[in-house]
Structure formats: structure tokens, C-alpha cells
Image: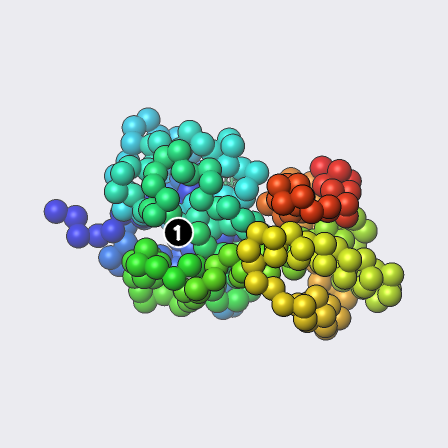
């Protein structure tokens, strides 16, 4: 009998590589890797050290695989093309952790499993592709998840790793705060194709405030508890960023990759319509950046 937990990671990009590396610190985990593009090694720079670990990444499988956990590290716009993986990797007992930006993380998976088998995860782990195919991870990863037994079981997978799991009572509010912040910053940087340098201008500070306030109206209608000081707090944080700071949306746009518009300004516009809240700035951004 195999006493190890069988864990699949789907999407071996920046976050998939970070998560796989952390899971490998627990020798009770047996890992299986699935992605669009195969590679011979996981290549990660973490805490100044280069790690190059042999890996067997499957780009296709013919029959279902038994997994105790499936950890999905895809971007929102990658789900549509990845949906053939789900019936092969998800069985009735399989627990799923979805790590991505945005809201409603369970939605694409509800056709394949029960709601209470899915753990939504928000990750703080800035990671970018650097030289020679290495992903560079800039801080120790923190996963924020809804407080639950499922979260505690997930935490066990990361025993002996440095990754922190932060269980919170109000995951919706935490997700919305991160979304408002990243959708506002990312969209304005993309519209101006520039870094935080642009916020020296009072006009751009005003635009930031307007876009943030519009997004917060939708967040509140959706049940997030965001107080009136939030915009000022975010603006103060913004003014302390180095001028050279960019965002993942800006990086993707400059690398000619699809930006996570649907997961950010797109969902704010969409939920605005559902709650009958006008979102003219987010609508304009979706049109301009689509
Ligand atoms: N990177 C960060 O710093 C960071 C920080 C916080 C949150 N996040 C969030 O984490 C999520 C994942 O981001 P990421 O940066 O890891 O993205 P990423 O580097 O693009 O990784 C996604 C991986 O999924 C693979 N993939 C795409 N379509 C697939 C398919 N149909 N079947 C199987 N595999 C497929 C990609 O394959 P290819 O190798 O062929 O492209 C890639 O390896 C996003 O929601 C992102 O916003 C990222």
C-alpha cells in the first residue's frame, strides 16, 4: 500500500514550479506533473539558491490517474483549453486546490466535483521567468485560503516547507481587496505602457482613485467588507513604490502574452452589470486592452 499522498500539479509555469518545489520538501508527497509544454527540469531560484530538479511533465494522458490532491496553477484564460484534463485528473475523492488571481475560482470545476472538495487559494509569491529558463521567486510564498478542514488538510501537504498558509474567515473580502488593488494598478500601467513612474502625475493619482472607488462599489455589492479608508491606504502604498515597479499585467503585455483581463477588470465589469452598478472605467479598460 502506498502511504504517500499522490499530488498532481496542473500548469508547471511560474507558480506551478514554486508550489512543486515546496511540496517536494515533504517526503510523504508523491508528485505528478501535467502541463502544456514539457521540460526536463524544474528550474527555480529561491532565497538566492538555484535549484534544478529532474521532472517528468506529462503533456497528455490517456486514462484517469488516481490523485489525492490536484493543485491547479493555471491563469483564468487558460482554463478553457485545459478542460480536457479535469475528468482525467479529478475523481470523487480527489481534493482540489485552485491557485489563481481573480474571483469565483471554483466555478470552472463544479462540473467535475463537489463544492466542498475545492479549496480557493490566493497566492503572494512574485515569480518571474529570468535567464536560462529559471523562475525567480522573490519571497517566501504565502497562500491565503478560507478557514476550513480542507485548508488544514492542504496545510499538511506543505509540512517541512517554508510556504505559509494563512487561513482567513472572510476570504471574499481578502480576494476583493487584492483584486481591486491589482486590477487598478495593472490596468493603468498597461494603458500607459509604463511603470509606477506615471503616478508622479496628479492626474494619474486621480485616475487611480476613480478606478479604485468604482471597483470597490462592485466589491461591496458582492458582499466584501471594505472600509472607506482603503483607497487612501492603497494610494499611500502606491506612492512608496519604486518608479520602476511594474505589474504582472504590464509584464504579460510587454511579452506579447495574453493579460489576465477577464480575471481582473473583466469580472469587475461583469459583476457590476449583475448588481446594476455602472462601471464605465472598467468597461473602457476591457475594451481598450482586449
Ligand atoms: N507569477 C506570479 O508572480 C504570480 C503571483 C501571484 C499570483 N499569480 C497567479 O497564479 C496563476 C498562475 O500564474 P503563473 O504566473 O504561474 O502563469 P504561467 O507562468 O503562465 O503558468 C501557467 C502554466 O500553465 C500551463 N498551461 C497553459 N495552458 C495549459 C493547458 N491547456 N494545459 C496544461 N497546461 C497549461 C502553461 O504552459 P506553457 O508553459 O506552455 O505556457 C504554464 O506552464 C495566475 O492566476 C496568476 O495571476 C502569479
Q: Position of residue 41 (x, y in %)?
A: 43, 48
Picture quadrant where residue 202 is located: bottom right
Q: Tell me: residue 37, above or below residue 116.
A: above
Residue 192 at least partly seen: yes
Q: Residue at x 16, y 48 (%)?
A: 2
Q: Residue at x 43, y 59 (%)?
A: 145
Q: Residue at x 67, y 55 (%)?
A: 217
Left or right relative to 109: residue 241: right
Q: Tell me: residue 184, above or below residue 12.
A: below
Q: Position of residue 119 (x, y in %)?
A: 39, 51
Q: How is the image coloured?
A: rainbow
Direction left: furthest residue: 1
From the image, tell me which residue sits under label 1.
Answer: 119
Direction front: furthest residue: 276
Q: Residue at x 40, y 33 (%)?
A: 111
Crowding at dot 1, Cα within 10 Å, few <14 / some 14-19 / many 20+, comes out as many
Q: How many labels, in total?
A: 1
Amino acid at each position: 500500500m502506498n502511504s504517500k499522498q499522490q499530488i498532481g500539479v496542473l500548469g508547471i509555469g511560474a507558480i506551478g514550479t514554486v508550489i512543486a518545489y515546496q511540496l517536494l520538501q515533504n517526503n510523504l508527497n508523491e508528485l505528478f506533473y501535467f502541463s502544456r509544454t514539457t521540460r526536463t527540469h524544474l528550474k527555480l531560484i529561491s532565497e538566492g539558491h538555484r535549484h534544478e530538479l529532474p521532472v517528468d511533465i506529462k503533456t497528455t494522458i490517456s486514462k484517469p490517474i488516481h490523485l489525492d490532491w490536484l493543485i491547479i496553477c493555471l491563469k483564468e484564460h487558460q482554463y478553457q483549453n485545459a478542460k480536457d484534463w479535469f475528468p482525467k485528473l479529478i475523481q470523487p475523492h480527489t481534493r482540489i486546490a485552485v491557485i489563481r488571481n481573480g474571483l469565483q475560482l471554483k466555478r470552472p470545476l463544479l462540473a467535475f466535483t463537489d463544492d466542498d472538495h475545492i479549496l480557493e487559494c490566493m497566492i503572494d509569491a512574485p515569480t518571474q521567468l529570468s535567464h536560462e529558463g529559471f523562475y525567480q521567486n522573490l519571497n517566501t510564498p504565502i497562500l491565503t485560503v478560507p478557514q476550513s478542514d480542507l485548508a488544514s488538510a492542504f496545510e499538511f501537504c506543505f509540512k517541512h516547507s517554508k510556504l505559509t498558509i494563512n487561513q482567513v474567515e472572510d476570504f471574499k473580502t481578502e480576494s476583493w481587496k487584492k483584486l481591486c488593488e491589482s486590477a487598478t494598478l495593472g490596468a493603468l500601467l498597461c494603458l500607459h505602457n509604463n511603470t509606477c513612474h506615471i503616478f508622479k502625475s496628479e492626474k494619474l493619482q486621480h485616475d487611480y482613485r476613480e478606478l479604485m472607488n468604482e471597483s470597490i462599489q462592485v466589491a461591496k455589492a458582492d458582499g466584501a467588507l471594505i472600509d472607506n479608508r482603503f483607497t487612501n491606504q492603497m494610494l499611500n502604498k502606491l506612492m512608496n513604490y519604486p518608479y520602476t515597479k511594474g505589474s504582472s499585467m504590464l509584464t504579460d503585455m510587454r511579452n506579447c502574452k495574453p493579460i489576465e483581463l477577464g480575471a481582473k477588470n473583466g469580472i469587475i465589469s461583469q459583476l457590476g452589470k449583475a448588481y446594476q452598478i455602472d462601471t464605465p472605467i472598467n468597461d473602457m479598460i476591457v475594451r481598450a486592452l482586449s
